[in-house]
Image (tube, rainbow, N blue to C red):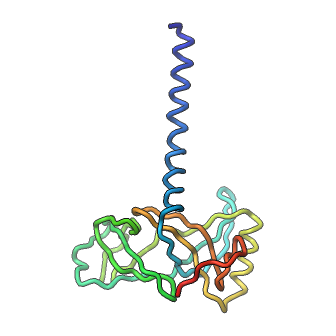
């Protein structure tokens, strides 16, 4: 085989390997969207602008706590899995453990765990198209009467943010959405 042919084959193989990584990550996120359980977290958003990352809605997710009699089992910087249950106010934490379950979210405990344990959620930003982010921020900042939610699908420790809603209506599509009951 000629040197040029070997190089061409090597370039093709390396290109295929490089393309497989993003495809794997995209497929994993799509699986979370398709089969993950949806939870609605209460938010109080602000719309900042980042020159490099574009427009996004900053999500001020309301703090979550979990009261446990076994707070000694958790230490600072532990990786834990949190399970949630949906209620009328959004979500509440139902379990905190070191074992992953199908609909648990993987988190890191940043501070020294106290009782109740403070749960710091990993989502802070919801990226949108420029026009939509401005419109949604205007709507959220002027309408303080309604409860606002970010919709997160959770599967095997991973999550995908899918929507922002207010008063039972998606602020992205304008269509009715599931609200907590």
Vertical comparison of 55 with 9: above or below = below
Q: Nearer the viewer, residue 127 or 161?
A: 161
Write the residue at 63% across / 77% down.
177
Residue 142 appears left or right of 28: right
Vertical comparison of 124 with 138: above or below = above
Write the residue at 61% across / 82% down.
148
Residue 20 appears left or right of 98: right
Write the residue at 53% across / 64% down.
160
Residue 161 appears left or right of 158: right
Write the residue at 46% across / 67% down.
154
Q: Nearer the viewer, residue 5 or 36?
A: 36
List x then y, in percent, for residue 59: 58, 74
List x then y, in percent, for residue 113: 31, 77
Task: Quadrant for residue 162, please give it.
Answer: bottom right
List x then y, in percent, for residue 144: 67, 89
Q: Nearer the viewer, residue 141 or 2?
A: 2
List x then y, in percent, for residue 57: 64, 71
Vertical comparison of 143 with 77: above or below = below
């Amino acid at each position: 085989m000629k040197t040029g042919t070997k190089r061409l084959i090597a370039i093709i193989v390396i290109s295929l390997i490089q393309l497989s990584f993003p495809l794997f990550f995209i497929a994993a996120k799509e699986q979370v969207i398709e089969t993950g359980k949806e939870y609605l977290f209460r938010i109080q958003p602000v719309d900042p602008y980042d020159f490099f990352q574009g427009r996004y809605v900053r999500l001020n997710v309301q703090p979550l706590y979990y009261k446990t009699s076994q707070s000694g089992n958790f230490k600072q910087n532990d990786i834990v899995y949190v399970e949630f249950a949906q209620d009328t106010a959004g979500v509440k934490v139902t379990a905190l453990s070191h074992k992953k379950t199908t609909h648990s979210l993987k988190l890191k405990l940043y501070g020294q765990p106290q009782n109740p344990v403070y749960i710091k959620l990993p989502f802070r930003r919801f990226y949108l198209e420029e026009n939509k982010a401005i419109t949604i921020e205007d709507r959220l900042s002027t309408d303080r009467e309604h409860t606002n939610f970010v919709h997160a699908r959770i599967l095997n420790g991973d999550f995908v943010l899918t929507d922002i809603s207010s008063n039972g209506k998606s602020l992205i599509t304008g269509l009715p959405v599931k609200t907590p009951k």
